[in-house]
Image: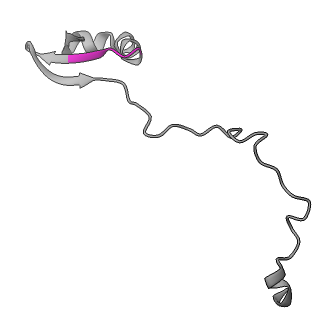
Amino acid sequence: MSLTVNMHEAKTNLSQLVKRVETGEEILIARNGHPVARLSAITPEKPQIPWDIFKGELRMLDDFDDPIEEMKDYL
């Protein structure tokens, strides 16, 4: 459900309105009783991948930096 406030009230109480928007509420801003703008939260475009997502799942072999057999002639 959205709340409608007039322009003066929106300017006066912007901080409080933003707090309400952060909790998921939508605010309509009206001029002369007619809605002209919508104040809504911004959702992240893509979630951050945690750095430790594969912790304990991957291991590095002792010979990881040894030359590849096919490449030995070029090194």
Q: Residue at x 37, y 16 (%)?
A: 24
Residue nearer the viewer, 44 or 20? 44
Q: Residue at x 51, y 37 (%)?
A: 47
Question: Which x, y percent locates residue 26?
Answer: 28, 17
27 drawn magenta: yes
Residue 51 located left or right of residue 3: right
Residue nearer the viewer, 71 or 9? 71
Q: Residue at x 34, y 13 (%)?
A: 17
Q: Residue at x 38, y 10 (%)?
A: 16
Question: Which x, y percent locates residue 63?
Answer: 90, 65
Q: Residue furthest bottom?
A: 73
Residue nearer the viewer, 16 or 71? 71
Residue 7 located left or right of residue 42: left
Image quarter hosting the C terminus: bottom right
In the image, residue 59 above or below residue 3: below
Question: Which x, y percent locates residue 70?
Answer: 79, 84
Report how many numbered discs are placed on residues in the image: 0
Q: Quadrant of residue 36?
A: top left
Residue 8 located left or right of residue 65: left
Image quarter hosting the N terminus: top left
Magenta stretch, residue numbers: 23-28
Q: Quadrant of residue 10?
A: top left
Question: Which x, y percent locates residue 39?
Answer: 28, 22
68 drawn magenta: no
Residue nearer the viewer, 64 or 11? 64
The color scheme shown is one colour
In the image, residue 67 above or below residue 48: below
Q: Quadrant of residue 41?
A: top left
